[in-house]
């Protein structure tokens, strides 16, 4: 193998003769059995999920262990091996030009967006799905430039170094420019061991063509991009440990295989040979700030704490979610575990991968099978705030009690979910089909009734004034969470400004004082319209816009000391002790505290 070192340019990777590492033919289980090679590209273009059965590399057919029986049944001789997709511990955040690619018939022909897209934002799924994780019909396209995926390696079998059987299989399922991917092997501290390799997939031979459709990966949920649908070429490479300069002298230092993307990298999977190395699998998932409950979805929740418990319920590892809400427990030995979410303060679990609202999930992994998509959805309840409502004597009032209520997760408060709490003694209780109380009556106070938009109407009982019983209510959001109770406080003011009848019925007022200059005949020939006769039913009328009626201001003691001989029924003074207009009724002094609007003209 020829290695060229660009020392003057300080490039830390080596270009090499790529033809020796090309896979020249692939075999899959598409439609039962399908094969295509660089010298005889199949006219059949796979358009759905299909798993890699074998590759031809340096003239030798090497199986992947997906289904050797299919190869045998079709007369193909091969060297048996077992390959698995390397577990993806962390996915780089997608850019606006990153896409989830799936076969055109995946989930249904075309966009298949009704009722939901056939793909999700769990991007690492598409790098490890299928039998042994070797699905060639799903992929992530345009992984961001300079981003990388670190695959954890537990140990290496030194006998696999330079044995003529590949240790890694790398896929490129889309057309690519002249940009290069870089592969390197490192120790636990990310120091390079051996020799990094730079690979230009544009010069690698095409072995097949597939039919794809695409969904933008940087939005939630992924959106179908119809203009990108079509065929893409498949290229595959395979590497031996020796290609990276791994020898008997340094293999014990290896702990990671690192793939650095060009920005045009389109990967279905990166696979390893079980006989070449031990790769413990990962336990992983995502914590979502989930506004609609059910299957976890939404925006990832950053900085949540997730614990890994062993079979004895002992915490053996802790992970913190990244900005996308992802957590991972890499390099986990085979066994049975429990994942436990430490629910952030103020949040509740509204769904998980098991379809319930527990904060724990079981996780079982083997040497070849990881445990992924162990997702949780969390959310904060909506906040119902107190409402203070006023009205006047004998007048109904309406008020939208949702106007000051909020959902802290940018979720949606459901207006129809308003649930009133009837006080003790309430009658005529009205409920909706969900059992929410929508109205009731309290004797001698009034009636409360809320509509489907959250608008409350309070109708006071005729003659009632003051403060009716404080009523509480709660609301729900789209996640089904219920708020704490909020108060509805109402004040019915005991006064009104009813315009008195001026021309119909009643006795004319024959005495008055006005500062408005309109006393006497108004010139229309009708004495009933003259002032003060137009004001009905009073001994005297006082009228001014700039002057006030001044009463004697006395203390309660002074009022009581008014000589009985001077007291006259109807006498008025202002009681400065009790802060009221005090009227002598012929027997005693009474505070005039309730102003009303009599219906007598």
Image (cartoon, grey):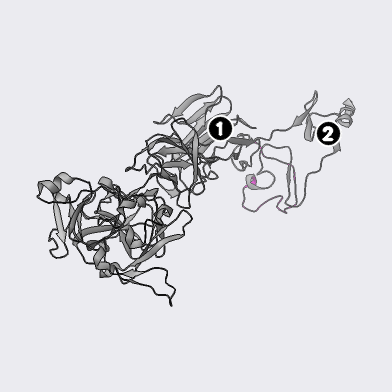
Few, some or many C-alpha atoms within 10 Å of disc 1 (few <14, some 14-19, many ≥20)? some
Q: Is residue 481 magenta?
A: no
Residue reaching furthest to the top: 425
Based on the displayed image, in which of its 4 quarters is residue 432 positioned? top left
Magenta stretch, overall SS: loop
Vertical arrangement, residue 174 with respect to residue 152, above or below: below
Determine which residue is flagged by label 2: 577
Residue 472, disc: 1
Q: Secondary structure at mark 2?
A: loop
Measure how far apart labels 1 and 2 are at the Cα level: 37 Å
Residue at x 45% of width, y 28% of height? 430
How many marks overall? 2
> Can you give x and y, in whole percent of width and height, for residue 601 in the image?
61, 36
Residue at x 22% of width, y 46% of height? 66
Span of residues in magenta: 506-527
- Nearer the N terminus, badge 1 or badge 2? 1
Q: Nearer the viewer, residue 12 or 350?
A: 12
> Can you give x and y, in whole percent of width and height, for residue 350 in the image?
44, 38
Residue 260: in sight, yes or no?
A: no
Vertical arrangement, residue 233 with respect to residue 312, above or below: below
Residue at x 74% of width, y 32% of height? 592
Where's the N terminus, which quadrant? bottom left
1 vs 2, front mark: 1
> Can you give x and y, in whole percent of width and height, for residue 467 in the image?
63, 32
Residue reaching furthest to the bottom: 8
Q: Secondary structure at mark 1?
A: strand
Q: Is residue 447 left or right of residue 589?
A: left
Residue 456, disc: none
């Amino acid at each position: 193998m020829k290695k060229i070192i660009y020392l003057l340019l300080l490039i830390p990777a080596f270009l090499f003769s790529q033809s020796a590492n090309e896979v020249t033919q692939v075999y899959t289980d598409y439609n039962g059995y399908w094969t295509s090679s660089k010298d005889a590209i199949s006219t059949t273009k796979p358009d759905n999920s299909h798993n890699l059965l074998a590759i031809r590399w340096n003239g030798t057919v090497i199986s992947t262990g997906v289904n050797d029986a299919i190869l045998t049944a079709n007369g193909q001789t091969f060297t048996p091996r077992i390959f698995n997709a390397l577990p993806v511990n962390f996915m780089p955040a997608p850019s606006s030009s990153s896409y989830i690619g799936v076969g055109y018939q995946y989930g249904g022909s075309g966009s298949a967006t009704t009722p939901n897209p056939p793909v999700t934002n769990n991007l690492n799924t598409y790098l490890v799905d299928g039998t042994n994780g070797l699905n060639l019909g799903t992929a992530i396209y345009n992984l961001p430039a300079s981003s990388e995926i670190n695959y954890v390696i537990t140990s290496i079998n030194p006998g696999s170094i330079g044995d003529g059987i590949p240790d890694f299989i790398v896929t490129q399922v889309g057309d690519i420019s002249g940009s290069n991917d870089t592969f390197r092997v490192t120790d636990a501290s990310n120091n390079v061991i051996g020799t990094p390799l730079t690979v230009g997939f544009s010069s690698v031979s095409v072995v097949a063509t597939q039919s794809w459709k695409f969904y933008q990966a940087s939005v939630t949920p992924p959106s179908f991009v119809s203009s990108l649908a079509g065929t893409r070429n498949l290229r595959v490479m395979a590497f031996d440990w020796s290609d990276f300069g791994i020898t008997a002298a340094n293999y014990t230092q290896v702990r990671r295989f690192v793939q650095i993307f060009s920005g045009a990298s389109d990967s279905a999977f990166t696979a390893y040979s079980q006989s070449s190395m031990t790769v413990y699998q990962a336990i992983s998932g995502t914590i979502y700030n989930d506004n609609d409950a059910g299957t976890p979805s939404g925006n990832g929740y950053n900085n949540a704490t997730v614990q890994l418990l062993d079979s004895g319920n002992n915490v053996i590892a802790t992970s913190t979610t990244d900005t996308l809400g992802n957590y991972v427990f890499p390099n986990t030995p085979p066994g049975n575990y429990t994942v436990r979410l430490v629910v952030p303060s103020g949040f509740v679990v509204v769904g998980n991968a098991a379809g319930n609202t527990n904060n724990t999930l079981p996780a079982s992994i083997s040497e070849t099978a990881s445990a992924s998509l162990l997702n949780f959805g969390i959310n904060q309840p909506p906040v119902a705030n107190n409402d203070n409502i006023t009205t006047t004597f004998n007048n109904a009032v309406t008020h939208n009690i949702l106007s000051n209520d909020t959902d802290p997760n940018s979720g949606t408060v459901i207006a129809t979910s308003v649930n009133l709490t009837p006080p003790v003694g309430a009658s005529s209780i009205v409920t909706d089909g969900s059992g929410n109380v929508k109205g009731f009556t309290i004797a001698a106070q009034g009636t409360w009734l809320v509509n489907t938009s959250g608008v409350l109407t309070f109708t006071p009982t005729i003659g009632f004034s003051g403060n009716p019983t404080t009523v509480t209510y709660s609301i729900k959001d789209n996640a089904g969470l219920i708020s704490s109770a909020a108060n509805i406080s109402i004040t019915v003011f005991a006064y009104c400004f009813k315009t008195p009848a001026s021309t119909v019925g009643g006795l004319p007022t024959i005495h008055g004082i006005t500062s408005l200059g309109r006393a006497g005949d108004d010139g229309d020939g009708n004495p009933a319209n003259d002032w003060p006769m137009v004001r009905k039913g009073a001994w005297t009328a006082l009228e001014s816009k700039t002057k006030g009626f001044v009463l004697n201001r006395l203390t309660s003691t002074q009022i009581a000391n008014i000589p009985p001989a001077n007291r006259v029924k109807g006498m008025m003074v202002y009681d400065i002790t009790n802060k009221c207009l005090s009227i002598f009724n012929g027997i005693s002094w009474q505070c005039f505290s309730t102003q009303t609007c009599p219906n007598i003209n």
